[in-house]
Structures are given as C-alpha cells and as structure tokens.
Image (tube, grey):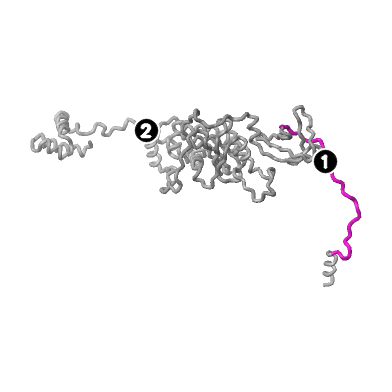
C-alpha cells in the first residue's frame, strides 16, 4: 500500500492495540479479513510503520524498458520503418533488429511519441450485408483469382495478380505486371502448376479474360481476341471457371490485397524495391513468409490438386492460339513475317494451299504449330510471294454525260 493509506491503516491498528476498537470492527472499517488484521498487527508491532508500505515502492520494475532502448525504437519507427502498422513493426523489430517487446509496451511508447498506427483510422462495418460463405474443405478444391492495381513500389502503378486457396487462405501464386493482362494470369497459373499441381476450380470476377461474350459472332475470331485463351487453357487442363460480379463473394482474395497494400508495400520499400523484376523476385520469398503467418496448415493427404503436366506441356498449355491459312508456298503470315513449318529433321513441311493450321505462341515466346494432328516448329520462309502485276491501260477519261461532269457544269452556270 502507498504511504497515505499506510497512515490510515496505522491509525486503525493503534486503536485495536489500545483496545478502543475490536479486530472485527477494524476488518469492517478497512474491508480486510480478520485474519489479515491479525497479520498486519503482528508486522506493525515488530517492524513499525515501514512494514505497512509495499516493498516495491520507489523501485523500478524488473522488466522496465530503459530509456536507451525506447529511444532506439522511436528512431527506427521514424526512419526505416515509417508507415508500418504497429503489429507489423513489432514483428520487424524481432526479426530484423532482434528487439523483443510486447505489443502493449510498443503501443504505449509509440502513442506517447505522438505516432498513430495506419490502421487506426479505418472503421469496420457493423452491418454485414454479405454473409460469409463457408470455406471449402480440401486444399486445391477452389482457388480465388483477382488483380489489384496500385502504387506497389515507386511512383508508377502496377497490377498485382494473385491466387489464394479457399480452404487454407494460402497464397499459391502472385505476379506483378504493368496492367491486368493474360500474361499476368498465365504466370500465376504457371506458379500453381509447378508448385502444387492442377486445381479443381477457379473463382474469378466477370472479366472478359475469364468469361468472354461476343457481341458480334460473325466477326469473332480467335486471333482477333486473346481473351478466350485463359478459358481454353483451363478447359484443356480440366479446371472449371466460375465467375461472379459481386466482389464480396471472393472476399479472401479481396482481403489479401488489403493486407498486401499494408504490409507488402512497407517491406518492399524497406528492401529498396523500385522495379518490376526485383518486385517479382521479392514477391516469391514474401509469399512464404505471408503463408507462414496467415495461412492455415495444409493437409496434403486430402489435397485435390491433380498431378502437374511436364515443363514442356505447361509451356504449351500456357500459350496464345492463332489460326492461319497457308498460301501456295506452304507459308503463312504471322506478325509481319512469312513462316513455314519444319519437321524433326529440319526440313520444310509441304502443305496444300488454303489449309487452316493452328499456331501457338508459347509462354517463352516460342512458336509451335499443329497440322494434321502433329506438332511442328516454325522457321522464317524463303518463299517470296509474287506480287500481282498491275494491268497497263489507257487513262480513263469520264464521258460528257458523267454525273461528275454534269455537277461541275451546273456549278459553272451559277
């Protein structure tokens, strides 16, 4: 007890000693048990007034943070870890600076130094108009896909393509690209296939890249529209695609971007990431760290991922398909080039004119073609298509009764 209360207790104990007050009355007055009154009397008779004051009075706690450590923490938050939320900063102190401190102590130090956590101002919705959907039971049963454009590093906006497992909240793929592109989603799918296998189902928003609906079927051709490519690839791998126009329906991937915008941006700034190549390399290591902290444990015994194709097959699956028609020289045009098919021996394949062939631009920018159910490589054609000769004739002179002449003459008369 403190000194002021100790003086009051002493006055009561003196009355009990002088027998002007009973121990029972003292226990009621002090709101102590009678046995504790006898204990205080014994201490007071033996040691006097000092026995009533707590022994830790004016003593610093054994776990008190010294001023030097507190100053170091404040300086770190001002400089290297500026903008980190308090919980993330606590983790960084332990991992990078080897400083252990409880969250309550850290919160007290930073708020007393007039810092406010970036998460402090965000209000949570009270009414949940979109009830939560139960998780899938098995790893690989459902993968949520989406993209978020943001200033992830530097001053230029980039798009982060990401995939998260619905059952475990484990991030299974992520990739930065300039825009939301087919290539970005292909790179995410490549990571999924190489690291885990073929999932059962994708859950995405209703973008044309996943759910293409042509307004003019007459003019719809596969080479004029690359948006059907991801759906074709998924169909060949046996992956179903379900789309939704409600962002809350795929809330796990939406919340993932919220977490990444808070934590990933801070860590990339801490590691001086300022270009997309370094960002994608850093992202692969960060995914492991994120999954260790936020994802549930993965039960691979009940996983529904199917075995992945070979590396060459993945390169072919993740391709863009085009249709071309050959000319008289067994060649075809592709991106301002004349190409021909070659067999395993390197010899040019003879193809009848006006034959339709399928061209695949693979993920590594290679070109393969399918003709007569066989896969061929391509080479630049040595065949030069002859130009059509222009017919030479006399210069055409419109007759006097030509509408154009009548119009000119009428203008002259006016």
Number of numbered callouts drawn: 2
**Residue 71, can we see it?**
yes
407 or 69, which lies in front? 407
Dominant SS of magenta comes to loop
312 or 83, which lies in front? 312
| Residue 137 relative to residue 182: left or right | left
Q: Which mark is residue 201?
A: none
Question: SS of the residue at dot 1?
Answer: loop
Where residue 61 sits, quadrant-wise, is top left
Q: Which mark is residue 66?
A: 2
User: Residue visible at 44% across and 48% down?
Assistant: 129
369 or 49, which lies in front? 369
Q: Residues within 10 Å of mark 1 (few under 14, many from 20)?
A: few
Circles 1 and 2: CB atoms closer than 8 Å: no
Label whose residue precedes the other's in the sequence (1 or 2): 2
**Residue 78, can we see it?**
no
Question: SS of the residue at dot 2?
Answer: loop
* Residue stretch rendered in magenta on the structure: 374-402
Q: Position of residue 311 (x, y in %)?
A: 63, 29
Quadrant assignment for the N terminus: top left
Residue annotated with mark 1? 385
Where residue 239 sits, quadrant-wise, is top right
């Amino acid at each position: 007890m403190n000194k002021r209360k100790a003086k009051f207790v002493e006055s009561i104990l003196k009355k009990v000693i002088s027998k002007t007050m009973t121990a029972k009355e003292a226990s009621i007055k002090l709101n102590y048990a009678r046995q504790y009154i006898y204990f205080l009397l014994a201490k007071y008779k033996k040691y006097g007034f000092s026995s009533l004051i707590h022994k830790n009075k004016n003593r610093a706690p054994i776990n008190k943070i010294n001023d030097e450590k507190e100053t170091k923490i404040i300086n770190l938050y001002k400089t290297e870890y500026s903008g980190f939320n308090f919980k993330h900063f606590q983790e960084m102190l332990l991992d990078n600076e080897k400083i252990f401190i409880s969250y309550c102590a850290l919160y007290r130090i930073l708020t007393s130094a007039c810092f406010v956590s970036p998460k402090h101002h965000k209000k949570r919705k009270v009414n949940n108009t979109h009830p939560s959907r139960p998780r899938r039971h098995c790893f690989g049963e459902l993968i949520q896909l989406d993209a978020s454009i943001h200033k992830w590093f530097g001053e230029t906006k980039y798009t982060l393509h990401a995939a998260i497992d619905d059952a475990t909240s484990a991030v299974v793929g992520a990739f930065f690209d300039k825009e939301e592109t087919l290539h970005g989603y292909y790179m995410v799918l490549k990571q999924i296939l190489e690291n885990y296998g073929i999932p059962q189902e994708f859950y995405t928003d209703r973008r044309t890249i996943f759910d293409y609906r042509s307004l003019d079927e007459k003019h719809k051709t596969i080479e004029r529209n690359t948006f059907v490519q991801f759906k074709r690839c998924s169909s060949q791998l046996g992956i179903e695609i379900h789309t939704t126009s409600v962002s809350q329906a795929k809330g796990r991937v939406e919340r993932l971007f919220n977490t990444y915008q808070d934590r990933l941006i801070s860590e990339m700034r801490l590691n001086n990431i300022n270009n997309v190549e370094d960002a994608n390399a850093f992202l692969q290591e960060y995914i492991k760290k994120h999954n260790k902290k936020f994802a549930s444990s993965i039960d691979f015994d009940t996983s529904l991922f199917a075995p992945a194709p070979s590396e060459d097959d993945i390169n072919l699956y993740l391709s863009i398909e085009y249709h071309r028609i050959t000319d008289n020289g067994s060649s075809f045009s592709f991106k301002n080039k004349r190409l021909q098919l070659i067999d395993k021996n390197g010899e040019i394949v003879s193809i009848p004119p006006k034959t339709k062939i399928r061209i695949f631009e693979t993920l590594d920018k290679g070109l393969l073609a399918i003709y007569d159910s066989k896969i061929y490589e391509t080479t630049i054609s040595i065949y030069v298509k002859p130009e059509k000769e222009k017919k030479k004739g006399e210069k055409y002179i419109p007759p006097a009764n030509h509408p154009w002449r009548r119009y000119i003459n009428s203008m002259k008369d006016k």
